[in-house]
Amino acid sequence: MLKILGWAGYDEGYKRTFDTFQEDTGIRIFFYGVPNQDEMHKLALTQEFDVACPTTDRLMSWCSSDLIAPLDETRIGYERIEPTLHADAHTVIDGKRMGSPCVWGGAGIGHHTGKAPIVSARVSLMDLFDPVYAGQLAMREDTAFVAVGRALEEGGKLPYPFADSYLVEDRMIANYDVIGAFLAKHSNHVARFWFSEEEGVNVFRSGDCIIGYSWDSSLAKLDRAGLPFRFVAPREGAICYLQNFVISKKADKGLAQEWIAWVNTPKGSAYYASALGVNPCAIGAMDLMDANVQDFIARSYPPEAQLKLWWQPEQPVWFIKNREKYARAYRNVVGK
């Protein structure tokens, strides 16, 4: 049995994917679902697993924790991954391939098409703080700093380039102090915080929020349910992640490599990406995706938006520690 540690909130899609993998290979999967990256890493420290799927900006912390082993590219069909993803820049650490990209997606603006209509070609992350939406905004307290930081940077209102926040701790603190002050000033806009995929869907489904800083996958779920919500990549660029499969040092490497190799086929990649409602990484997979997922991705990431994708940089340990401190302060100011 293959033990996979991954993202919670996609049960129906996972079942189809895992069942198909078992039909093709005879291998059964036991799946542990967690709501976010921090919980995934914490569970990996105590729970036996074969494969996990952190994003590239967290790979270094998994390596530093001595949790994962290098991948054998010849056993996982690595050559089938889209070269446009420039995966080498994200997944090679100290000369070793530590991750195999499996899906990518992004965060941007989720909105109710009737109650919060927006023009996608002009929308900015700053539009989230339009007074008309006060008390109706959904936010994720830690990544709110990334969204606002990118927007303030475009307006020339940060002391340092936002990307420097990931490289130099003093510059992160200087930038995050400015961002935190902006968020505190507009704290009355927030109706609800969300942290997991399920919460990211429910803040809109409940009617509490009509606009928010959201994952594309959350809006894909609402879209498939026929609800009047859409995802828009803002003019600053959707803030993107590249999810990877990693193999535990204690893994059954044969089973783990067979799973990764299967997902790196067009068929496996299409199944896995359709389960999450996001973009596949294998060459030829998009053509095999569910039609509704293809349509959602095309609407969410038109050609002009694809040219402005902003990939989340690696997050050092000191960055994560400081980020959590600022996120707690933001939640305390909002009081929710």
Image (spheres, grey):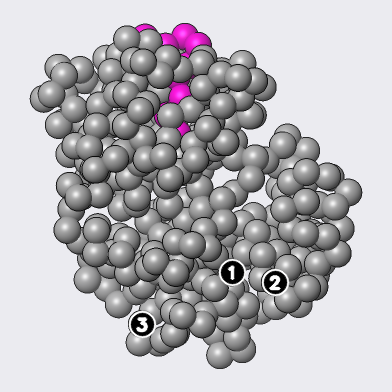
Residue 50 vertical placement versus 307 (above, below): above
Answer left or right for 155 relative to 85: right
- SS of the residue under disc 2: helix
The residue to which callout 1 is attached is: 236
Residue type, numbered disc 3: Thr
Quarter in which the C terminus is drawn: bottom right
Q: Residues within 10 Å of mark 1 (few under 14, many from 20)?
A: many
- Nearer the observer: mark 2 or 3; the answer is 2
Q: Where does residue 29 sit, x and y in percent of width and height?
A: 26, 23
User: Are the two marked residues, 1 and 3, in contact with CB atoms closer than 8 angstroms?
Assistant: no
Residue 274 vertical placement versus 110 (above, below): above
The residue to which callout 2 is attached is: 154
Q: CA distance from mark 1 to mark 3?
A: 21 Å
Q: Is residue 246 magenta?
A: yes
Residue type, numbered disc 2: Glu
Q: Where does residue 251 sit, x and y in percent of width and height?
A: 42, 11
Quarter in which the N terminus is drawn: top left
Q: Where does residue 153 sit, x and y in percent of width and height?
A: 73, 68
**Looking at the image, which is closer to me, 111 or 96?**
96
User: Are the two marked residues, 1 and 2, in contact with CB atoms closer than 8 angstroms?
Assistant: yes
Q: Is residue 233 magenta?
A: no
Q: Residue at x 86, y 58 (%)?
A: 174
Q: Which residues are magenta?
A: 244-252
Q: Residue at x 83, y 44 (%)?
A: 168
Q: Residues within 10 Å of mark 2 (few under 14, many from 20)?
A: some
Can you name the residue that lies furthest to the bottom here?
Answer: 132
Answer left or right for 24 relative to 303: left
Q: CA distance from mark 1 to mark 2?
A: 7 Å
Residue type, numbered disc 1: Glu
The residue to which callout 3 is attached is: 113
